[in-house]
Amino acid sequence: MTSVDESASSGIDGTPLTIAQIADRAGVSVATVSKVVNGRDNVAAETRELVEDIIRRYGYRRQKRQGKAAPLLEVVFHELRGLYGIEIINGVEQVARRHRLGVVVSELEGRHVPGPGWVEDVLARRPTGVIAVFTELTAEQREQLRSRDIPLVLVDPAGDLDTASAAVGANNWNGGLTATRHLLALGHRRIAVITGPEHVLSARARLDGFRAAMDLAKAPVDPALIRIGDYQIADGRHHTRELLRLEEPPTAIVTGNDGEALGVYQAAAEVGLRVPEDLSVVGYDDLPAAEWCIPPLTTVRQPLREMAAAAADMLLALARSEPLPRQRVELATELIVRGSTAPPAFPGR
């Protein structure tokens, strides 16, 4: 790889570099640097890495003649399945329409971290900003967006946040607490929980809320009743089958999302148990389908549409170089009580 020319005079004063100055340091043409800056794919990987390294170290000064950002909001999901994504898109669209912006949606096929090539596609589109949903960007990807003046806001962030990240989420700890306290108030004591992945922030917070509620009620937490899922219907079904085979099965189950709750319904039906007479179930999200379950699902409402709209508003403020009142916005959750919860058939269990 060509080495960076540390003796070049440009950038000594700490001012971000122009394309011409970057080209001078890298020993490549201005056209090549322009291709990298704008996400074009016809650049050798070694050359691209060299140019990006210079941009990371010295910064990049966009020239006015390169034009404005495209009137687009880019929304990236780790996967697009079910109504969760639709609620998010509707919230972003609500803000985008008001500002006469289009919305571009991309999907990572289940990965939480974008793979090679994703950021180059974004740079080529040069959107007004990027909203990453339940997704983690690498430090390098975040820096590539920042150096091109493309703001980023995270919605329902999956991983730990750096101090500079703008993010919108829900009060997941309180959601787990409220769901569990509802079941305790009904008389349940042997309560199971099926969470999301251990490395995901929302899953950890909801489990912590569950533990806090049990602790406050002085109700013992049996480790056998804590199951780590993946926010999918299939793991809700799988873990419930195992829970119901225990010598002392639970009388109620708190799930990480409405999909897992549907899996609980399926597993209970397989062995002839009735919801809620034999088994109470609480979901999370309150997607529209929660009302269609039989019986309708008691669930914690996560205001997904409002979260997405708040993220879009933050993104546009950043695009206008306006300071945000808060880097982190956390919206309230709410327990929606329906027909899937009732007192246990044998109180005290």
Image (tube, rainbow, N blue to C red):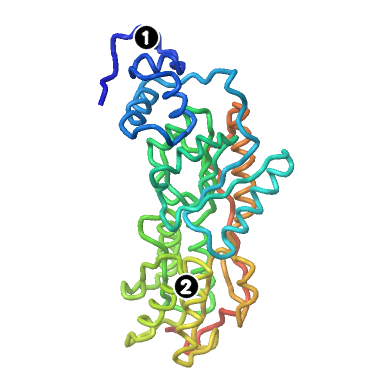
Judging by the rendered image, the residue that carries numbered circle 2 is: 233
Q: Which mark is residue 12?
A: 1
Height in image: 228 above or below 89? below
Q: Secondary structure at mark 2?
A: helix
User: Of the residues shown, which amino acid type is indicated by label 2?
Assistant: Ile
Residue appearing at x 53%, y 63% in the figure: 81
Total numbered labels: 2
Residue reaching furthest to the bottom: 272
- Percent of width and height locating residue 173: 48, 57
Q: Is residue 98 left or right of residue 89?
A: right
Q: Give the Cα distance between marks 1 and 2.
A: 56 Å
Residue reaching furthest to the top: 9
Residue appearing at x 60%, y 50% in the figure: 307
Q: Is residue 235 left or right of residue 174?
A: left
Residue appearing at x 43%, y 58% in the figure: 110
Q: Nearer the viewer, residue 315 or 347?
A: 315
Q: Quadrant of the C terminus?
A: bottom left
- Percent of width and height locating residue 257: 50, 66
Q: Quadrant of the N terminus?
A: top left
Height in image: 336 above or below 263? above
Q: Nearer the viewer, residue 57 or 337?
A: 57
What is the crowding at mark 2: few (fewer than 14 residues within 10 Å), some, or many (at least 20)?
some
Height in image: 347 above or below 306? below
Q: Tell me whether the residue at label 1 lies in contact with that at label 2, contact meaning CB atoms closer than 8 angstroms.
A: no
Q: Secondary structure at mark 1?
A: loop
Q: Is residue 148 left or right of residue 310?
A: left
- Percent of width and height locating residue 17: 43, 16
Residue appearing at x 35%, y 33% in the figure: 44
Question: In terms of sequence position, does the residue under pointer 1 or pointer 2 come before the other?
Answer: 1
What is the crowding at mark 1: few (fewer than 14 residues within 10 Å), some, or many (at least 20)?
few
User: Of the residues shown, which amino acid type is indicated by label 1?
Assistant: Ile
- Percent of width and height locating residue 120: 45, 38
